[in-house]
Image: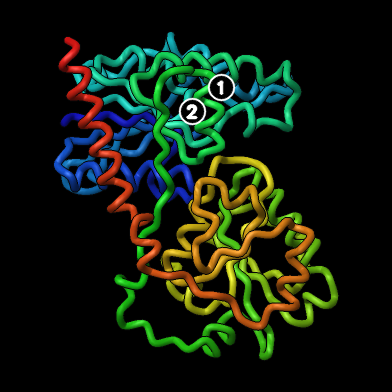
Amino acid sequence: MKVLVITHHRLINNFNGAVTRIRSLAEQLAHQGAQVTVWSFISPRLSPLGSQELVPRCSHYESTNQLQWLDGLSSRLGFPSYSLASSLNTFLPLPRPLKETFDIVISESPFLWQIAKRVTGKVKVLSAHNHEATYHEGFSPRTVRLIKRNEKRAVQEADLVLCVSEEDKSIFEKLRPGKLIQTLANGFHKNSSENGGYRESKADFKKNWGITEPHRIALYLASESSHNQRGLEALSHLFSDPEIKSRWSLLVVGNIKLSGHLPKSIIPCGIQNQLFSFFKGSDIALNPVFSGSGSNVKLIECLGNGLAVLTTPFGARGFNRSLKGLSIEPLGRFKTRLLSQPDWNLPDPDELMTYEWTQIGNQLFELLDSSLQSKEKLI
């Protein structure tokens, strides 16, 4: 099976949920025996990196999309990013390698559908990380019109549509009546298998980050996306509360942009090469998001590595809400839970096995293979 994955994200050294999903699934398809090409149409502000082999049979390439300069104009006019570029991608010249024939062409978001349509492939797949109109609900209906039109067209024209939550599936089914929409959850990698010799105690971990006893530790994994930024603002307010400050410290890990006015109880840790010590040293992970993407990779990453999670209902999108170790509360009740709960129920490893990226990758391979066989029967 020859697979092309098209994305507008840079996959190398990039910290966010979309990149984690795209790269993990591409690598798992390669492990299943597919020949995978990942092509990133990156911002013209970046210089393309050379080709790289992510894993055997999975290669990654970059080229700039000069049409994205128009997103600067659209942003100044109050339109969401990619509004103009996604519509004009039909005119973007295809790099020579994309003029080959592929069995499967996967567009990782509707923004690139006008490119995916022009690549020769037997099965065209839209992999929707979220419902774009919901994601951009902070904009006026007029400004999201182009994005909504482009997304509707992609959902209707694709041979197969994948999404990450039942909420998004329900929306796409209305755009594509009578056709099946497949849900494919986000997954996690077990960090512990890479750190078998880890011996740092919780006390040493606290000392390394300047946290004194008897403070407890909450963890927030966050990329620079706008919904994570809004989540951090909510946590900044929470961790400014005197009762919370006297009992809790918050470690913020990732490339999220930090203001200079964070309370002292919030400790920025930046991007970390490994997260194992954070999973083992923290008491609870927090997921305060109340808008944005369809589901959050950070939630299942924490659960899968043994750390309980306190999340908003929106932050639990895409996952079984009865998972052990998962507590779901509105933001207004985070303070009560943090102050009143001495211990948290730990996740159940057996219950989470189906969320490992290897299992999610197997599901995707089977879906693609089945779609390919069905398409070939019709030809």
Q: Mark 2 points at which residue?
A: 44
In-front residue for pair 32/278: 32
Residue 320: in sight, yes or no? yes
Which residue is depicted at the point 48% across and 89% down?
201
The location of residue 191, given as percent across then percent down, is 37, 67
Q: What element carries label 2?
A: loop
User: At 38% across and 55% down in the image, what residue appears?
Assistant: 355
Q: Please state which amino acid type lies under the numbered disc 1.
A: Trp
Q: Can residue 259 be seen in this view?
A: no
Residue type marked 2: Pro
The x and y percentages for residue 301 are: 45, 60
Whole-percent x, y for residue 204 in the image = 52, 88
Mark 1 highlights which residue?
Answer: 69
Which image quarter is the C terminus in? Answer: top left
Coloured how? rainbow
Left or right of 54 on screen, residue 170: right
Q: What element carries label 1?
A: helix
Rounded to the nearest whole Å, what is the CA distance between mark 2 and mark 1?
7 Å
Q: Earlier in the sequence, mark 2 or mark 1?
A: 2
Q: Label 1 near label 2: C-beta < 8 Å? A: yes
Tell me the crowding category of disc 1: few under 14, some 14 to 19, or many 20 or more residues within 10 angstroms, Cα based.
some
Comparing 209 with 111, the one in front is: 111
Snapshot quadrant of residue 113: top left
Q: How far across and down, in percent of the image, does residue 124 sit?
A: 32, 21
Q: Name the residue: 58% across, 55% down.
A: 222
Question: In the image, which disc is placed on residue 54?
Answer: none
**Mark 2 crowdedness (10 Å alpha carbons): few <14, some 14-19, many ≥20:** some
253 to 256, vertically: above or below: below
Q: Which residue is painted at 42% across and 46% down in the image?
A: 185
Q: Place residue 1 in its image quadrant.
A: top left
Give the vertical position of 62 relative to 119 (above or below): below
- Is 145 situated above or below 167? above
